């Protein structure tokens, strides 16, 4: 159930809108039937069967089933929406019970008040709004609601869209293999009534443009889907085919190199890790090169694509293997970041490189002590087959040289040491010849709350991965494992380079607000925001 407001209502005419809201709701609760809605209005609002709620701006006459008022304080609530007794209840909930989200049931529809937290730092305030949006989204789903309108009464565009973003991202579910879908989320439409969230398509930042926000949210959903797929479905070959589909959808060029091509290129790291598998490896290149690109040399994104990691001959213990389908989270994030960039038609030349294989035991699997010859001609002594991600990334980083890149960023679930050091709240970041770029992407990390903790890449760490029998060994001592892994990868670069170890935040065993449970899609929003800043 809901209320009406007149076509042509301006955001400045708040009192008129509020009066109509109250009048509509009060009339609605006094009737046993729904409003008589014109047929042409009903036809305009077909339910979207996709899980992702679309965020849009609304100014048309329509039925509003549920409403969220986003305000900086209760004093800012528009007059006429609530009765005196309702305001007394809302004040008591906020002041005495310290609630920032107050819900009010008007029998046939719900009204929610969200009071923006008084955070001086913009990034902290927006993150609180995302979390609040997720909470309200959960409430709406528990009521089987399909649509909500967010009323930005005071013109807070960034906070309002962050609220909508958290609501949309928190709506994600992976139900592909479930027969019982009774708990399927119902929310499909998030509409914003605002005088400040009014950007035309293709303009504005992700903070003020719902069109771009929808694109990024869609990319996060697709990324989570790939991560959550079991290895029984998502082989390296299937992963590459999924990226080909993404390329057709967004207009990016996709090339898939098969095992024979990798043998010609002498990619000993990828081929070595793949030796224990019955599935062939792939190396997928996804390129977006618009005619109006602001950069002549590309920004290259590299993602680790281990579709399942058993540890190889250095077999992981039981629980440590449980979620190893997520070991391709870096490659998924790279693919979907390029997808979002292309779909949004950002004028930036970007290339995604995604080597993919599984790491299993087999009669031909590599063993500790083996020496591999890499794509760039260097040799690597394998001390531990469970340090396989850096082997396939090393070949991809060497291959990136052919593009003469402006910058290379790799993203990988690389080390357990990163999880132990930082946990799920951030990724570890290191750089070589890219100190300014790391500062810029760290700022994007705060803006998206996909944060980066910088670790050093000092020369002394390079001494820890020298081998007596090859140029390098793939494992250092027990100390500083995240850093020595990054230092290993640096040996295969000669360009500005950033390494991001996303092992902690890529996959969650327990739900964490709008990040959900399972694959989080960490990195998609981070990379998109960084590229957006390069455009601006």
Image (spheres, rainbow, N blue to C red):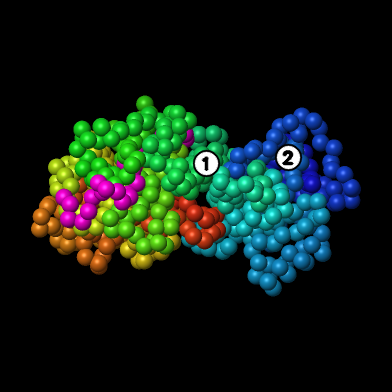
Which type of secondary structure does the marked residue at label 2 adopt?
A: loop
Give the percent coordinates (x, y) of residue 246.
45, 34
Left-right relation of 67 to 368: right
188, above or below 156, in the image:
above
Nearest to the eye among marks 1 and 2: give it.
1
487, above or below 96, in the image:
above
Q: Which residue is mark 2?
A: 9
Left-right relation of 355 to 200: left
Q: Residue at x 43, y 46 (%)?
A: 231
Q: Residue furthest bottom?
A: 96
Give the percent coordinates (x, y) of residue 487.
22, 56
Q: Residue at x 45, y 38 (%)?
A: 340
Q: Nearer the viewer, residue 339 or 203?
A: 339
> Can residue 168 be spotted in the picture?
no
> Can residue 51 be spotted in the picture?
yes
Neighbour tally class for label 2: few under 14, some 14-19, many 20 plus, Cα within 10 Å? some
Does the magenta run of residues contain 306? no
Give the percent coordinates (x, y) of residue 160.
59, 50
Q: Which residues are magenta?
A: 342-371
Neighbour tally class for label 1: few under 14, some 14-19, many 20 plus, Cα within 10 Å? many
Q: Residue furthest right?
A: 31
Q: Which residue is mark 1?
A: 218
């Amino acid at each position: 159930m809901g209320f009406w407001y007149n076509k042509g209502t301006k955001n400045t005419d708040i009192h008129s809108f509020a009066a109509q809201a109250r009048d509509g709701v009060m009339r609605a609760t006094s009737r046993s039937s729904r409003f008589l809605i014109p047929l042409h209005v009903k036809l305009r609002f077909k339910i979207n069967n996709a899980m992702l709620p679309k965020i849009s701006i609304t100014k048309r006459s329509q039925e509003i089933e549920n409403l969220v008022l986003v305000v900086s304080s209760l004093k800012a609530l528009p007059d006429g929406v609530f009765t005196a007794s309702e305001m007394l209840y809302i004040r008591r909930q906020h002041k005495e019970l310290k609630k920032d989200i107050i819900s009010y049931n008007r029998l046939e529809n719900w009204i929610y008040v969200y009071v923006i937290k008084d955070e001086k730092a913009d990034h902290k305030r927006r993150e609180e709004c995302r979390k609040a949006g997720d909470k309200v989204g959960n409430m709406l789903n528990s009521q089987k609601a399909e649509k909500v309108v967010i009323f930005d009464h005071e013109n807070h565009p960034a906070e309002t869209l962050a609220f909508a973003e958290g609501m949309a991202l928190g709506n994600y579910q992976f139900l592909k293999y479930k027969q019982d879908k009774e708990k399927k989320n119902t929310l499909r439409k998030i509409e914003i009534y605002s005088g400040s969230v009014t950007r035309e398509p293709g303009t504005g930042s992700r903070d003020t443009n719902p069109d771009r926000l929808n694109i990024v949210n869609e990319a996060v959903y697709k990324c989570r889907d790939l991560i959550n797929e079991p290895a029984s479905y998502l082989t390296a070959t299937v992963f590459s085919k999924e990226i080909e589909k993404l390329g057709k959808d967004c207009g990016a060029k996709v090339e898939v190199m098969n095992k024979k091509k990798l043998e010609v290129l002498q990619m000993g790291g990828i081929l070595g890790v793949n030796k224990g598998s019955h599935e062939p490896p792939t190396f997928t290149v996804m390129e977006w090169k618009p005619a109006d690109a602001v950069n002549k040399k590309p920004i290259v994104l590299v993602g680790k694509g281990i579709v399942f990691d058993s540890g190889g001959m250095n077999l992981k213990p039981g629980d440590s293997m449980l979620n190893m389908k997520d070991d391709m989270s870096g490659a998924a994030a790279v693919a979907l970041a390029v997808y979002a960039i292309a779909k949004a038609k950002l004028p930036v030349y970007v290339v995604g490189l995604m080597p993919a294989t599984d790491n299993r035991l087999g009669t031909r699997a590599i063993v500790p002590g083996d020496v591999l010859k890499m794509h760039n001609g260097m040799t690597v002594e394998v001390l531990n087959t469970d340090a396989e991600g850096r082997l396939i990334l090393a070949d991809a980083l060497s291959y990136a040289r052919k593009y003469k890149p402006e910058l290379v960023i790799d993203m990988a679930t690389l080390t357990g040491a990163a999880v132990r050091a930082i946990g799920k709240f951030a990724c570890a970041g290191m750089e070589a010849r890219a100190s300014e770029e790391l500062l810029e992407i760290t700022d994007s990390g705060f803006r998206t709350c996909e944060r980066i903790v910088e670790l050093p890449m000092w020369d002394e760490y390079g001494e820890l991965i020298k081998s007596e029998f090859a140029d390098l060994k793939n494992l250092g001592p027990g100390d500083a494992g995240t850093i020595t892994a990054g230092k290993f990868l640096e040996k295969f670069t000669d360009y500005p380079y950033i390494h991001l170890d996303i092992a902690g935040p890529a996959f969650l065993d327990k739900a964490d607000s709008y990040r959900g449970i399972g694959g989080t899609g960490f990195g998609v929003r981070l990379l998109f925001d960084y590229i957006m800043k390069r455009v601006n």
